[in-house]
Image: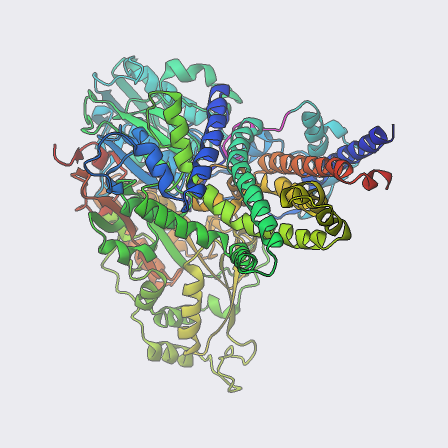
Amino acid sequence: MLGSRYVLKKIGWAVLTILFVIVLNFFLFRILPGDPARSGVRDPRLTAQAVEAIRVRFGLDKPIINCFQSLNPVEVGDCFVNPMDTQFFIYARNLLQGELGISYHSNRPVADLLLERLWNTVLLVGMGQILSIIIGIVIGVIAAWKVRTSVDYGALIGGLVAWSLPTFWLGIILLMMGSRHFDLPIGGKITPGATYANAWEQVLDVGRHMILPTLTFTIVFVGEYLLIMRSTMVDVLSEDYVLTAKAKGLNNYQILRNHALRNSMLPMVTIIALNLGFTVAGAIQIEAVFSWPGLGQTIFEAVNRRDYPVLQGAFLIIAVAVVFANLIADLLYSYLDPRVRAA
Amino acid sequence: MTLPSLLLPKNDRLPPRGGETMFTKIRSTLAILLVIAIMLAACSGGTGAPAPEAATSAPADSSQPAEPAATEAPAEAASGGQVRIGWGGSPDTLNPGTAILSEAYILFELVYSSMFDLNLDGTFSLDLAESWDVSDDGLVHTFKLRPDFTWHDGQPVTAKDVVFTYNFYGSHEDFPYMPVYTEYFDSVEAPDDQTVVITLTEPIPNIESQLVFMYILPEHIWAEHDTPEGATAFENEQMIGSGPFKLAEYRQGEFVTLEAVKDHPTSPPKVDGVVFQTFDNQDALVQALTTGQVDMVTELPNTAVPTLRNAENVQLVVGAPLAPEVTDIIPNQVSEENCPPEDGVCSGHPALRDLQVRKALAYATDKQKIIDVALLGLGTPGLTLIPDGLGVWYNDTIKDYPFDIDEANRILDEAGYLDSDGDGVREMPDGTSPLTFRIYWPSDSSTAPRIAELLGESWKQVGIDLQPQALDPDALTSVCCPTFDYDIIIWGWGSDPDPGFLLSVHLTDEIPTGNSETGYSNPEFDKLFAQQATELDPAKRKEIVWQMEQILHDDVAYIIPYYAQATQAFRTDRFTGWITDQPKVALEDPTSLTIITPVGN
């Protein structure tokens, strides 16, 4: 079947991309300057033995890969060591066994540590995306339908303003207003030390903590969706088949739903897929303003600490998310526009 | 009560913890649905905000419908006797062996006991021990433990736990700090359940400052983790200690909840518990205090101080930090013969090896202006590398070089550094290389760029030109020491309660190790260091230490621009009794947290 070959090909490429990312991830961080065994602490009381012991514990004393002892500074090493005794192949083997390693900083398993953060990010970003997509599409369609009226201009200006607002600033402003006038929590995901009588209370508590970050996220992202939806829709509405549909006497809802919307969804699907993938990395700024314990925050900290295992794990998750979102988009295209399948 | 570290990364934030249960996930999924509902309701209602208000505080009380500030979520109702503290960081781990960040040590002080407590005036007092005897030769220290200490799980604290703890810390070489504290331990023994005998290999004058950070661990929990891998892998998430607070809940990177041990034998807290909540953003932290979402904050941006001075129900506390930090301007003084043979590049400007030039730089440094601009006034002028926060060890009799551009110019003229080509920059006495210095600082510092700019302005007036550049801390380490590939660096040290460590960075022996950033070398200083390291009489030791500080000041090994002050703030309408009148400020210390009481009780 034509469809399944197309699907298989796309999946094959996705797997190849992820493999490439796995290799790149390893070398990318090791080209950076800085010694993970000492990073962050310029403390001479870390004795030479302690530093050496830390290196041994995390396998940092081993060569990076055959022929290279280290990559920054570049240091040529023995080419005939057992590959299983080099950092790269140990990393690859562990990954095959599903091991992401131990964080240098907190001595915790990376998988545990990332999973909780990932979930928090998905909760926040997912919520924000859903809201901004729905609101963006709805307003975009309305604006396009009422093109060159005050409704359209209002939506256009509002969308542009929202899109250009600095995220950090908007977050701080909402935080100040929300905490002062509406008694909303300033940071975190739940109230620390709270005891809940039942699960519903906890849900309410998380919900209260989510309001401000989600609102910020929605405002920042809705502009993009709105503007793209509107411009595509304006194009589509000027097509002959829309005129034909009008001539056939279809009502507005039928025209929009059956003729215009599906045809203008293609660029939207692209942009949504791209955004979904990248926003798994967390809306770093929003997480920072609202102290939201998400993935973006974790990555930022791990970079500063040269915490390679955490970085590798996090980048792998992001890569998988981006590739997966694109795969879904590709498959959706073929559903939305059968011509894609032939290409 | 203190944080050991040198240049502890401040404001450090942490990777998360794992182990979320399926239950939480299900509840969180519900939360999504809830929030969707709330949001949609809010959207249809016009403005985004009031809807959740209604959702959380809907009930009966219709007599005062329009007072949103008084409504409280049910989840927050339980915070009566609980002190809510906001901080900018989070512990890296709860394992005292492997912890590095200061936030971890703040928790250890509250949850664990050790042989000594560090008081807010810099002195030590006995904590777990009720008596302490030293043999005449200073080698044998005998501690009698208090009989009434128990672990948070109910078992008694015995001398065996202490012996286990000291051996445990000393035997794991990959612990970052602990093995250093047991360096001079020959043996630790427990002749009976209440007696601990520590025998040293040589007499040391500062055993208090070694023992104060060695938190006593329960052997019945830690013994099974006393293996090379186990000791570092153990996350210690129950954190059973014997201090005035016990751990209730720990969410790395989010919050830590502690519960009061009301029947603690020496310092039973009057509050019910303490919550430390992490804020990744300093503006949010300040906002949390002014809106009353936290009762105290452990650190504040200096920019927030003017606002908080006038804030309602907020009291600001300014003073020396519990673990003072020294900021230093480091001139590269390493001589050719001391240049480390293996790593040394030693590209420092030759003029900086001349004492007269360094003196001129000291005269040309406007410390008060630096304090006013870089710290917004929240600092005291620096004098010697032992900060004023170190109490008796701080030599306040030293006479500083006053800010005097004319004197600086006179010294340079006299020493033969003249501006022979009239470009405004002096040259070496032999007419070669101009006095143009590279000045570096760590890129994560917010104050150093301002200091560099101010130095550039005032040093320019004495014919010295600066080429400023911020460097990544790692890159800075690699040009600093022991490579000595720089002219001037602005950097700093955190400080121990004991002056020994800070003084040691100026030893000739430390030049090749990388601890000495200056390359300073003075045989007399080295000799005095060895003397103070074994001088058991505190008064005599103080004399020697003061003399060493004077030597460093005379030689202008460092220029110390200021001692930064710690700023903390608390809400006056929640708890009273915070200790604010001591030389050091540490509201998060057990000294305050065990005596404060809720307002109105």
- The answer to whether residue B506 is left or right of residue A141 is left
Count up the numbered dots: 0
How would you classify the magenta stretch by its main secondary structure? loop
Is B192 contained in the magenta span? no
Tell me where residue B569 appears, x and y as whole percent: 25, 47
Q: Compared to B113, does B358 lie above or below?
A: below
> Based on the displayed image, in which of its 4 quarters is residue B259 positioned?
top left
- Could you say which is closer to the camera, residue B277 or residue B596? B277
Quadrant housing the C terminus of chain B: top left
Question: Does residue A107 belong to the magenta stretch?
Answer: yes
Is B446 on the left-hand or right-hand side of A234? left
Could you tell me residue B460's position as x and y percent?
Answer: 44, 76
**Eyeballing the image, is A210 above or below A195?**
below
- The answer to whether residue A256 shows anywhere in this view is yes
- Camera-nearest residue between B560 and B454: B454
Q: Quadrant of residue B62?
A: top left
Q: Residue at x 29, y 58 (%)?
A: B378
Depth check: give the residue in front, B488 or B1.
Answer: B1
In this view, the residue farthest toward the left is: B601
Please give the range of residues in magenta: A99-109
Answer whether residue B531 is visible to the viewer in this image: no
Relative to B139, residue B431 above or below: below
Q: Position of residue B20 (x, y in %)?
A: 49, 24
- Residue at x 73%, y 49% (from the top left corner): A247
Question: In the visual, does A66 lie left or right of A29?
Answer: right
Coloring scheme used:
rainbow
